[in-house]
Amino acid sequence: MKHLHQRIREDLEARIMSGEWPPGHRIPFEHELMAEYGCSRMTVNKVMSMLAANGLITRRRRAGSVVAEPSNQQAVLQIQDFALEATRAGTEYRFKILHRSIEAIDAAAAQRTGLPTGTEMLCLSTLHVMNDVPQAFEQRLINLATVPEAGEESFKDDPPGTWLLRRVPWTEAEHIVRAVNADSAMAKRLQIQTGAACLVLERRTWQAGAFVTEARITYPGERHHLIGRFSPSLKGGTAAQAVT
């Protein structure tokens, strides 16, 4: 059973890491957190000290605490929500689930996710289309031990990534970007030439140490690029955030 300070810390970490509380956002004052969680000032102070030690918040005397700017080590790609981006851009968006099954992961997937070989995962393949043009092909594994409700979800209204972002806050993410050439099958899905350059984003997320999902998203190279924004960090380094 988790101690109260662990639960509070995980709640606050989830709000920060998911982007609900962006850099510069004021963290509730200690008395507000005491009232919200029904705990002592000592418990809240312990949580805030841990968050500050991990570089997630900056504590300011009298002014309160705020979410820290990411350091260069913390810079990550934003987790993309296709449906939200399309709404913001006024773009017509649709998606199609091309494959769905529950499968036991092999040794390679076990090594990537840190789970035992044979762990059952929900396996999904999704095509994302904007203005009738394929924008990305997504292959995803969802850990049913962490997100059991995914096994019964139809994903009729929301694509898997959007559904997860709205229901399962993540506290840790890993991104790997690769360049590949489209084979014939990928070229057909994305309506590009065989051998055309593609950008592949591999992403894995965890919630308080529990593996949530792995996504491998392939984009047509000519339709996508990465943009990095840099600014001085609070510790004298640089911070970056890249988006597709």
Image: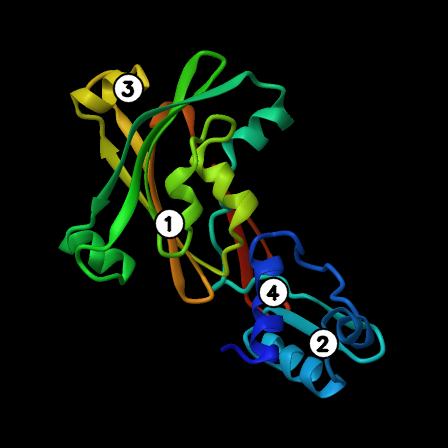
Instruction: Report the side of 71 relative to 61 (left or right).
Output: left
Image point 52% across, 27% down: which residue? 157
Q: Amino acid at mark 1?
A: Thr
* Residue that sits furthest to the top in the current view: 132
Q: Is residue 42 visible?
A: yes
Q: Amino acid at mark 3?
A: Arg
Q: Is residue 80 visible?
A: no
Q: Are marks 2 and 3 in contact (CB under 8 Å)?
A: no
Query: Quadrant of residue 3 in the image?
Result: bottom right
Label placed on residue 59: 2
Q: Nearer the viewer, mark 1 or mark 2?
A: 1
Q: Nearer the viewer, residue 162 or 223?
A: 162
Dot placed on the residue nearer the N-terminal end, 1 or 2: 2
Dot placed on the residue nearer the N-terminal end, 1 or 3: 3
* Residue that sits furthest to the bottom in the current view: 42
User: Which type of secondary structure does the marked residue at label 2 adopt?
Assistant: strand
Label placed on residue 189: 3
What residue does disc 4 label? 11
What residue does disc 1 label? 213
Marks 1/4: CA–CA distance: 19 Å
Query: Quadrant of residue 191 in the image?
Result: top left
User: Which type of secondary structure does the marked residue at label 3 adopt?
Assistant: helix
Instruction: Report the side of 130 relative to 69 (left or right).
Output: left
- Quick check: 50 above or below 224? below
Q: Nearer the viewer, residue 90 or 142?
A: 142
Label placed on residue 204: none
Q: Amino acid at mark 2?
A: Arg
User: Which type of secondary structure does the marked residue at label 4 adopt?
Assistant: helix
Marks 3/4: CA–CA distance: 39 Å
Q: Are marks 1 and 3 in contact (CB under 8 Å)?
A: no
